[in-house]
Image (spheres, rainbow, N blue to C red):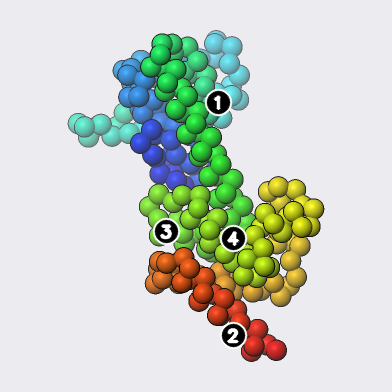
């Protein structure tokens, strides 16, 4: 399965459909179980006679594979949060409870990351693609910092503040509520920032460059 955001140390990742998933191999490792037994548990869950719907099984347990130390391809599963929950609800003991809590927290963090990524992608498609190229394991702030910087330079406020000022719901794209001039300025600064991300790693310095560039553009059109 292709990964938008690579697996972390717990095997949690984001697929290309913006869904947080976890690798069954990592689950076996952290819950101290043989992977073959985890596969057996999954097989029981998704068996047509288990009572689980075919749709739930299909959406939450994605068959995949990995290459073992003998260079042989072996089966595994990529599970969503719901699939993971269905699998581990029967795992008991203090250590199992600890790892359940850990994974739930990690899913929450990853899903918040996805929301940040989706919002950034809508507002700044070129910028977000290049941030993913520049950072092997991008964090939410890699996207939100750059997007908010450009929002502040163009509109004088962050996207959150803009929504509050205009009575927009949380998560609503602000782009439809900008003027044509603001949209053009955001697209221009976005392209400039793509180059600056590589050449100027310091955030404050990039911000000064972009503010200067905006001033020059406005002077040119005045």
**Any mark on residue 82, and which?**
1
Residue in the image at 55% along x and 10% along y: 49
- The residue indicated by pointer 4 is 148
- The residue indicated by pointer 2 is 216
In the rendered image, the quadrant that contains the N terminus is top left
Residue in the image at 53% along x and 45% along y: 113
Position in image of residue 143 (x %, y %): 52, 56
**What is the spatial separation of the Cα atoms under label 3 and label 4, in whole angstroms?**
20 Å
Confirm or deny contact between disc 1 and disc 2 (CB under 8 A).
no
The local secondary structure at tag 3 comes to helix
| Foreground pick, 207 / 67 | 207
The local secondary structure at tag 1 comes to helix
Q: Is residue 81 above or below residue 214?
A: above
The local secondary structure at tag 2 comes to helix
- The residue indicated by pointer 3 is 133
Q: Mark 3 or mark 1, which has the lower sequence index?
A: 1
The local secondary structure at tag 4 comes to helix
**What is the spatial separation of the Cα atoms under label 2 and label 3, in whole angstroms?**
29 Å
Asked if residue 62 can be seen in this view, the reply is: no
Residue in the image at 44% along x and 51% along y: 138
In the rendered image, the quadrant that contains the C terminus is bottom right
Q: Nearer the viewer, mark 1 or mark 4?
A: 4
**What is the spatial separation of the Cα atoms under label 3 and label 1, in whole angstroms?**
30 Å
């Amino acid at each position: 399965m292709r990964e938008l955001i690579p697996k972390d140390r717990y095997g949690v990742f984001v697929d290309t459909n913006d869904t947080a998933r976890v690798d069954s191999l990592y689950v076996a490792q952290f819950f101290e179980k043989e992977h073959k037994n985890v596969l057996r548990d999954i097989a029981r869950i998704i068996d047509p006679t288990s009572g689980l719907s075919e749709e739930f099984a299909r959406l939450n347990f994605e068959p995949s594979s990995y290459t073992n130390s003998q260079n042989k391809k072996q089966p595994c599963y990529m599970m969503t949060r719901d699939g993971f929950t269905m699998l581990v609800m029967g795992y008991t003991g203090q250590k199992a409870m600890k790892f359940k809590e850990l994974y739930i927290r990690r899913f929450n963090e990853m899903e918040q990351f996805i929301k940040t990524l989706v919002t950034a992608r809508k507002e700044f498609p070129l910028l977000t693609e290049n941030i993913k190229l520049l950072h092997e394991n991008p964090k939410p702030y890699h996207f939100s910092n750059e997007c908010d910087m450009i929002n502040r330079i163009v509109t004088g406020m962050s996207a959150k503040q803009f929504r509050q000022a205009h009575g927009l719901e949380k998560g609503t794209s602000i782009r439809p509520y900008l003027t044509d001039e603001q949209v053009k300025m955001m697209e221009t600064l976005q392209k400039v920032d793509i180059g600056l991300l590589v050449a100027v790693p310091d955030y404050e310095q990039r911000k000064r460059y972009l503010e200067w560039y905006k001033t020059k553009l406005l002077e040119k059109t005045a």
